[in-house]
Image (spheres, rainbow, N blue to C red):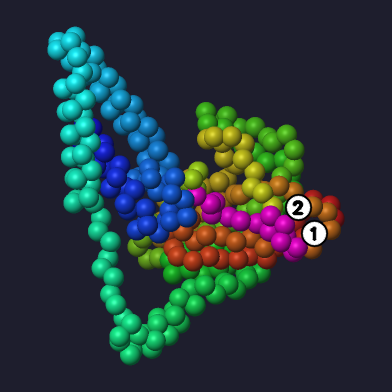
């Protein structure tokens, strides 16, 4: 068990740089699994506790049988060394580095490759309020913005209202693919959220949370299927913008629906119901 745990842990540390989703968060990368980094954290803690309890049991039993722990310490040290060796030889290998300094075409290759990279870094066009952003397999549009006390469903399914008004944003999502089912991918606690909101002077408008497991009524989860040709709505909550705000810019990470890139929506304050300027 110790060999497996040491080997798998070091293997995961060695693969941090290979993970595009968690490259900016080593803590999430350390415990990332094929499920989610959050689930990986809990699995990691459970696994670590199991290893610790198992080793303690073996140590106590060995002490009562042999009267000393020298052999136990030696065996565990060998297991750790074996785990490290296992991780080194079985873990991910870094791609070989090639020396392009002598190649006269290196500069040309870099210039050719930099064009698509620069294109990826371009700021996406801003979509007007109510207009759809068209992705390869779906369309999404921001159709409603209002200041109100939101309806919130807690972890046990009980529905109540927030104590104070929030900015409620409502999206309409349409699956435009002929065959694929569209699903919302819920946010991960270790990674940035799918939706970021700023005002016209670049103030960050914070998202609103009502606790673990609580969601605004109308928010999508990973359990809903949006069938081909069908539509669904999604709700996000933010703090009420400060007075004298002229407009808001909402940036959405398209990975929320399995696509690449970002979409930006412009929200004039005139479109926000019940907003006091």
Q: Residue at x 33, y 31 (%)?
A: 48
* Relative horizontal placement of residue 127, taking residue 224 as reference (left or right): right
Is residue 86 something one can see in this rendering?
yes
Label 2 crowd (10 A; few <14 / some 14-19 / many >=20): many
* Relative horizontal placement of residue 248, taking residue 192 as reference (left or right): right
Magenta span contains residue 90: no
Q: Residue at x 30, y 85 (%)?
A: 102
In percent of width and height, residue 272 lies at 75, 56
Label 1 crowd (10 A; few <14 / some 14-19 / many >=20): some
In percent of width and height, residue 51 lies at 28, 28
Quarter of the figure that contains the N terminus: top left
* Residue 175: mark: none
In percent of width and height, residue 26 lies at 43, 49
Marks 2/1 in contact by CB < 8 Å: the verdict is: yes
Quarter of the figure that contains the C terminus: bottom right
Q: Residue at x 64, y 60 (%)?
A: 250
Q: Which residues are magenta?
A: 191-204
In this rendering, the count of numbered labels is: 2
Find the distance from the CA under tag 2 to the CA under tag 1. 7 Å
Q: Quadrant of residue 130?
A: bottom right
Q: What element does badge 2 sit on?
A: loop
Magenta span contains residue 192: yes
* Residue 245: mark: 1
Q: In this picture, is 208 found above or below 144?
A: above
* Residue 241: mark: 2
Q: Quadrant of residue 50?
A: top left
* Relative horizontal placement of residue 84, taking residue 122 as reference (left or right): left
Q: Residue at x 35, y 85 (%)?
A: 106
Q: In this picture, is 75 found above or below 86?
A: above
Q: What element does badge 1 sit on?
A: loop
In the foreground, 211 or 134: 211
């Amino acid at each position: 068990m110790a060999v497996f745990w040491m080997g798998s842990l070091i293997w995961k540390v060695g693969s941090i740089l290979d993970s595009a989703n968690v490259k900016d968060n080593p803590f999430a990368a350390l415990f990332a699994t094929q499920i989610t980094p959050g689930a990986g954290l809990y699995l990691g803690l459970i696994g670590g506790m199991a290893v610790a309890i198992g080793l303690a049991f073996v140590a106590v039993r060995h002490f009562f049988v042999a009267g000393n722990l020298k052999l136990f310490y030696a065996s565990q040290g060998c297991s750790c060394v074996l785990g490290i060796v296992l991780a080194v030889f079985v873990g991910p290998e870094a791609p070989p580095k090639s020396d392009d300094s002598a190649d006269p075409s290196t500069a040309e290759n870099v210039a050719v490759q930099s064009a698509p990279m620069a294109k990826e870094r371009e700021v996406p066009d801003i979509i007007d309020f109510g207009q759809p952003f068209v992705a390869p397999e779906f369309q999404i549009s921001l159709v409603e913005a209002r200041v109100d006390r939101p309806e919130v469903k807690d972890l046990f399914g009980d529905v109540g209202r927030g104590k104070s008004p929030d900015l409620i944003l409502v999206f309409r999502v349409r699956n435009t693919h002929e065959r694929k089912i569209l699903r919302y991918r819920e946010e991960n606690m270790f990674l940035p959220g799918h939706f970021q909101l700023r005002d016209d002077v670049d103030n960050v408008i914070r998202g609103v949370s009502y606790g673990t497991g609580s969601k605004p009524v109308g928010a999508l989860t990973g359990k809903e299927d949006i069938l081909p040709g069908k539509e669904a709505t999604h709700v996000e909550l933010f703090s009420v913008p400060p007075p004298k705000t002229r407009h808001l810019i909402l940036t959405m990470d398209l990975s929320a629906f399995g696509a690449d890139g970002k979409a930006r929506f412009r929200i004039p304050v005139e479109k926000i119901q019940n907003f006091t300027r």
